[in-house]
Image: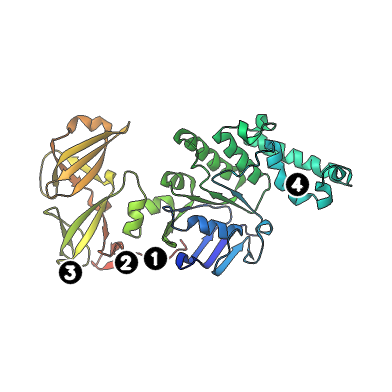
Amino acid sequence: MSAGVVLDRVSKRFGTESVLADVSLEIRDGEFLTLLGPSGCGKSTLLRIIAGLEAQDAGSVFIAGRRADRLRAKERDIAMVFQTYALYPHLTVAENMALPLKMRRMCLAQRLPGIGRLWPGRKAVARSIRDDVAATARALEIAHLMHRKPGQLSGGQRQRVAVGRAVVREPSVFLMDEPLSNLDAKLRVVMRAEIKQLHQRLGATILYVTHDQSEAMTLSDRVAVMHRGTLAQVGTPQAIYADPENLRVAEFVGSPMINTLSAIVASPSGVVLDGVALPLRTGLPAGGAVTLGLRPEAVSLAPAPGAGLLNGTVRLLEHMGAELLVHVALDGGETLTAKLDVARAGLVAVGRAVAIRPHLDQVLVFAADGRRLRCADHGGAVPASRGARA
C-alpha cells in the first residue's frame, strides 16, 4: 500500500481570515517534501491538518491510500517531530522513546502500574519494546543517553531523542515542524545531514516544514513554496531556484537574494535596462514595464565598458570565504549584487568604477504583475504554468 499523502482542495479559516485556500498536493511514497514559506503562510496549519490535530473546513486528506478526514490523530499512522521536541521532562530518554510503543502494543491493563506487570503477555511485549528502542537509539547514536532526562541533554541531543521517538514507531509518514529552529547554526548543519541520512536509510515519506531555504534546498526531493495559504510553486530544489514561476518565488529562494531590476520594453525582442539595450524577448508591446531577475552568479565583471554592459560603482564588498559579493550602484540608480570567485578580489575595490555583463541566457523576465514570462521561439510571451502537482 502507498504510504504517501494526498491533499485535495484543502481550505481552512480562522474566523474571517483565510489561512489555507484550496490547497492540492501529492507527497509521494518515500519522498522527502518540504513546505517552505515565511511565517504566517499556512504551512504549519497544513501540517497539523494532516496530523489530525486541526480540522480543515473543506477538502480531503488521504494517508497511505485511505481517507483520513474522520480519523483521530492516533489512528492516522503518522509520527510528528515538533519544534519544541515535546519530551516528557519526568521520563528518561528510554521511557520517552518507549511511550508510543507502549500505547500501541500494550492493552490498558498491561499499562497499569503494579498489577499491569503481572498481566499475561506483558513481559514479552515489554521485551520487544526495549529491543526496538535500543536498536533505534544505537542507530541515532544516543544509546549512552538512555538513562538521562531531557533536562540533562543538550539541544542537539533532545532533537535526536525526539526524532528517535518518531522513528521507533515505524509510521507510514513522518511530519516535522521546523525541528531545527531551536539549534545554533553549527548544530543545524549537523542535524540537517543526520535527517537526510535517516531518510536515505529508512526510505520513509517525510513532510518537513521550515522557513529556512537552506534546509529546504539541501534536504528535499521536492519543495512546495507557500504564500498566503496557497502553493506558489512545487518542484525540485534546482527547478525552484533556476526556474521560478513568479517573482515571489524567485525573491524568496536564493541567498544572496536575486537581483530585481526594472526595465522598459523597447520592442517584442528587446528591453532597456539602466539605459542599456538588451536583446531579451518578451513578446510585449513597446513601452511596457518588466522586472528582470538576475542571480548574483548570473553576472560577471567585464574588463572595460562596452555595448550591452551595465556601468556602476562598487559600494560594498563582502568576503564569504571562497566567494566575494560585490554590491554595485549602477549609474542609472539601480543596485545589483554580483558573486565572484575570491581570486578576483584584486579587480574590485570600494569606490571603483566597474562594468557588469549580465548572462542573458540566465536572465529571468517577469511581467508587471509578477508572473514569469517564458518566451517561445516565435516571440510570444507564455505565462508560467501554475499547477501544484509537479
* Quadrant of res 90: top right
Secondary structure beneath label 2: strand
Q: Which residue corresponds to mark 2? A: 383
Query: Could you tell whether 305 is left or right of 383 in the image?
Result: left
Query: CA gap, disc 3 to disc 1?
Result: 24 Å
- The first of marks 3 and 1 along the sequence is 3
Q: Between marks 4 and 1, how big is the CA–CA gap?
A: 46 Å
Can residue 342 be seen in the rendering of this structure?
A: yes
**First along the sequence among labels 3 and 2:** 3
Residue bearing the label numbered 4: 102
- Evaluate if marks 1 and 2 touch, with contact meaning CB atoms under 8 Å apart: yes
Quadrant in which residue 263 is drawn: bottom left
- Which mark, residue 285? 3
Residue at 31 percent across and 58 percent down: it is 247
Disc 4 and disc 2 in contact, CB within 8 angstroms: no
Which marked residue is nearer to the observer: mark 3 or mark 4?
Answer: 4
User: Mark 1 — residue?
Assistant: 386
